[in-house]
Image (cartoon, rainbow, N blue to C red):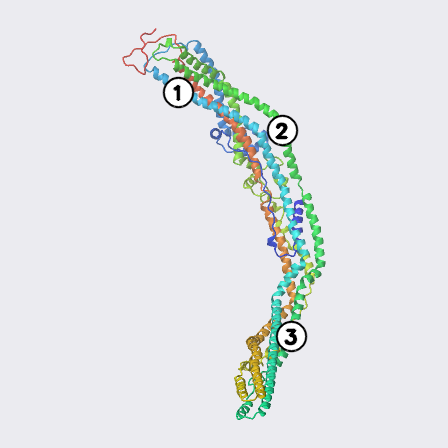
Amino acid sequence: MAVKTTLLFVLLGCGGVWAASGACSSGSLELNSLNQTHFKPDPSRDTGITVLSDMVHSFLDMVQPNPFPTELLTEAIKDASAITQEDSLRKVLKYEAGFLVCVAIGILFILLMPLIGFFFCCCRCCGNCGGRMYQKQSRKTSCKRRGLYWSLMLITIVILAGNICMFISNEKFTKAINNSPELLNDTLDNMKTFLSEIPQQINTVVKESSKPLDEVNRSLNDIGPLLGGQILQALGGPMYSALDSLLLVSQEATSIGEALMSMNSTTESLKQKQQEIVTNLTAIQKQIEQTLKNLDCTNCSQVSGSLNKLTFHVDFSGMPDLSPPMDAISKVKDANLSAIVNEANKTLNSIPERVSNETRGVVADVKKQLMVIEEKIGQIAQNIPLDQLTEVNKQLDTVMGDLHMYLPEVSQADKYRWIAGLILSCLVLLVVVCNSLGLLLGPAGLQPSADPTKRSCTADCGGVFFMAGVGFSFLYSWLLMLLVLLMFLLGGNVYTLVCKPWSNQQLLKFIDTPGVIPGFNLSDMLGVNTPLEISQIYSDCKNNDPIWSTLHLEDLVNLDELLNISKYTGDIQAAFDKTSIHPPEISLLNNDSLSLLQDFASSGIYGINFTAIEQQANQNLTTPYIDSFANSLDQLAMSQNQVIKGELMAEAADLRNLSRRIPKELQPQVETLKNSIEPLKVSTSQIPITINATLAKVEEAQKFINNTSEIIKEERRSFLNCQIGYFETYVGWANQTITQKVARCKPAANAIDAVELIACVYIVDSLNAFWFSMGWCLMFLLPSIILSVKLAKFYRRMKYMDVYEDTIPMCNIPRAAMKS
């Protein structure tokens, strides 16, 4: 239950507080994956004698074809005395029938070889069994010798091959013994690393909880900008659109007002200029009239008559009155829409600060809870019950200590064993050497045409070596067979009862059999409720499954129940629900401003007569009549005295100056008036549309503002749900990590495989390869003895001569002339 409590604190305690966070970006929470531990390499299955081991396995499988004796071993373990009962004994003998046959053959070899050797020696001493030094010659003598020669060479090569395998397997056995401590150390180190990795991985899961906790604290510290920003964003769409429209109306009204004022100023200026021109023209006209009265001439009446026509034809008095639209614009400007927009923006921008102030209490409470949970999470690693892992590590340390303690003794014993194996291999090699020397010296010193009684010393030595090999074979082959028999019984049964079922997992299934190991209950040892089997655990670990599924910890710890966040986030949700965030009070337009804009849109500036203005502005400003009248005065002055002439010419010059002033002073203002007509016409035609659209947006925004309380509740709920997303991200990662990634147990299966490899492949297979090679050599010693005895007579020097004559030589056999 301590593990369950631990998971409760780690996964749910921090997650419930995390839900109070304020950032809606749970997908951005990056959690580290578990570190990949590097283990030492496992032992290699390539022993260098794989082919020989396969031969041994095939031989032992043929000797013992029976399946693993589960029932028999179970009965023997439960009641050791039951094995001596007749029925059980019969089952044992039946199961070991193949071994018993081989043992019988070995015993016959052990008994008969020295006995046969003794009788053979006695017979040879009595001149029998080839002991008489006489060889009958025939036409087939040479063929027999060659046949025996090649047969013995083949047998010797086979024995040599077996002897080489003896040397190799003996060396491999020693190498396996010497390397086993290091390999076992690596295996135990890997196992200890795996066991120590479990709390480290749990600590990793615990430490990763600091990320959501930090994110929660950061969100709480920034709850004003975060939650307030979300509320502002929800309100900002319609509000900012309405405020922008109001600001646009204010800017348009100001622009139109300025244009109207400019146009009104231009028209007034034109009227004033017109009045000035008329006044000046009237004054000049009166001066001319006075001057003409003083003249006495026939042409004066004509000029005098034209004087009445000297008038200013441009008249700007028809300009429409712009006061009504200007008054309407002035009223809109007086409404001060810009101030309304600025005030509304100020109120909107104060929402984050308002949220921060009004949630200060709940933030403080949540932070206190976070501190408590953070403290509990920090103590989790110390509270996790790791006694069993510690105990296992102590046992592994004890095993490693015992291994190092007994290592010198094992090495010393193996040294003696290696010497013994070397001696045994050399004994077999001695027979091979004798046969080889015989095969080498015999043919080297033999002359087929020579008399058998006169064979060379070299050939005779070859024959003697053959007989020496026979003597050595009879002398100690039975003792070697005794050793083969003992090693065969030991190594063969270990292979068939331990190594082979271990390799195919039958041994693990046998251990799972109830009652095989008294008092052994793996489920109770591991503290789980589900019945466990070692074979199934090994199979799962072989697939690198996690401990969670391998040990069926879901039956002990209900993660779905522990990770039910609704139970642990309810208090925080309730605290947030009780938090009152007052909506901002925003009134975009009061009734007066609303009526003003509506009136302005309906009839405010429709009365401007742009056609009349355009007609007034399009008047011709040129004055050809004034210039013509000035010319008439000049002509009249030519016929007058100097005084009158000067007056008339001065008055003509005044007329010309006035004629030039008229377009110079009026044309720029007329052009300004013309240029302002079209933009103002467009603006005044669009302003009602703009105002109506603005009023619609203002109405929509005002309705939206009136529903701000619901918006705040929705955003607060969304904000809280987003913060729970941090917890869900962490919980999902923790769930997946615990159930799928923590403590992948392939190193445990590798450790079992490594022990099986060291014990069976390296040691047992080397032992079996040694006795198999030696037994192989001993079995071929039998034909070697027979062939050596027969072939020796073809090379040894005979005491008695045999002569054989034939007209047709056969096989290059020398013809004997006499027999004695």
Residue 573 vs residue 186: left or right?
A: right
Vertical relation: 428 (above or below) 623: above
On the image, which quarter does residue 247 sit in? bottom right
Residue type at the position of mark 1: Ser
Name the disc covering residue 428, or none. Answer: none
Looking at the image, is mark 1 or mark 3 earlier in the sequence? 1
Percent from the top left, x then y, of residue 292? 57, 91
* Residue 675 locus on image (x, y percent): 55, 76
Amino acid type assigned to the residue bearing label 3 in the image:
Lys
Mark 2 lies on a secondary structure that is helix
Give above or below for 424 relative to 37.
above
Q: Is residue 129 left or right of residue 810?
A: right
- Please report contact status of discs 2 and 3: CB closer than 8 Å, yes or no: no
Mark 3, secondary structure of its residue: helix
Residue 254 falls in image quadrant? bottom right
SS for callout 1: helix
Measured Cα–Cα span from mark 2 to mark 3:
101 Å
Q: CA distance from mark 1 to mark 2?
A: 52 Å
Tag in front: 1 or 3? 3
Q: Residues within 10 Å of mark 2 (few under 14, many from 20)?
A: some
Q: Is residue 492 above or below residue 605?
A: above
Mark 3 lies on residue? 333
Q: Nearer the viewer, residue 386 or 504?
A: 386
Whether tag 1 and tag 3 are in contact, CB under 8 A, the answer is: no
Q: Give the residue number, with chain letter if any, for mark 2.
A: 404
Q: Residues within 10 Å of mark 3 (few under 14, many from 20)?
A: some
First in sequence, mark 2 or 3: give its number.
Answer: 3
